[in-house]
Image (cartoon, rainbow, N blue to C red):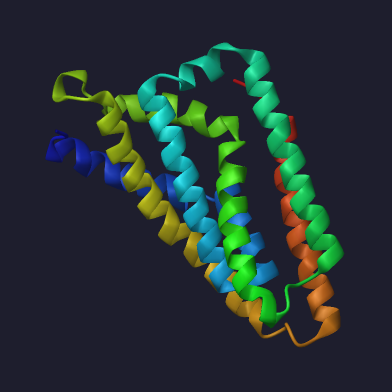
Amino acid sequence: MIDMFTLATFVPAALALNLTPGADMMFCLGQGVRSGPRAALAASAGISVGGMVHMALGGLGLGAAVAAMPWLFEAIRWLGVCYLLYLAWGAFRGGHAPEEIRAARASRAFRDGMLVNLTNPKVILFVLAFVPQFVDPAAGSILIQFLIFGAIMGATGFFVNGGVGVFAGSMGHYLTGNATAGRWLGRISGTIFTGLALRLAIMERA
């Protein structure tokens, strides 16, 4: 359905975009610092799933509704801001997750990563601006093409963002036995989440 030349052009472009530090990478870094490598990978997987949902919406044309209706864009944006601030509050209050609750943190990190991605309307606008450049209406289903490109973006993003989070989590793992260090790790991850919320709050719709 998608010719090899188009794929050969899209893959390095997707990899370059995922290697550019952004909200997804910083979120996985924060999760890694707070809850360890496993949670970082789970958060990265959640972000990839959220990205696939955005791609499906773009392929169905629903993304155009978000772009055309400012109130819907604003509602999703402020929902994302509130959720990030909620995560920051939890990080500041709870500090670093103890070893015995890491498994629970992984499933929660997946959910958080997916919700943070889904409540970022800038992602769907990015999908509408970037992906259509590679879609060929004559090549078959537009939705299927969006999903294929989404799978490529999600796979490269999972390894890049997950790798950053795992590195941060591995460093934080050595400090989990120190109560003072644990509090500081919680503050660091809380600051990252707060910064992402502020970034989303002040972003320009354009």
Residue 26 shown left or right of residue 54 in the figure: right
Q: Is residue 151 above or below residue 135?
A: below
- Above or below, 178 against 101 in this view is below
In the image, residue 74 lies at what x, y percent? Answer: 69, 22
Residue 145 in sight here: yes
- Residue 118's spot in the image, x, y percent? 56, 38
Using the image as rendered, state which of residue 93 and residue 127 is in the foreground: 93
| Residue 198 visible in image | no
On-image quarter of the C terminus: top right
Q: In the rendered picture of this protein, how many numbered marks are placed on residues?
A: 0
Q: Using residue 152 as the reference point, say whether residue 96 is left or right of it.
A: right
Q: Nearer the viewer, residue 41 or 165?
A: 41
The residue sitting at 56% across, 72% down in the picture is 37
Q: Residue at x 41, y 61 (%)?
A: 159
**Which quarter of the figure is the N terminus placed in?**
top left
Residue 61 image offset from top left, x and y in percent? 40, 19
Residue 116: image location, x then y, percent: 62, 44
Q: Vertical placement of 68 versus 44: above or below?
A: above
Left or right of residue 26: residue 42: left
Residue drawn 32% across and 47% down?
152
Check the image and report above or below for 88 versus 98.
above
Instruction: Give the quarter of the image for residue 59.
Output: top left
Residue at 45 percent of width and 49 percent of height: 48
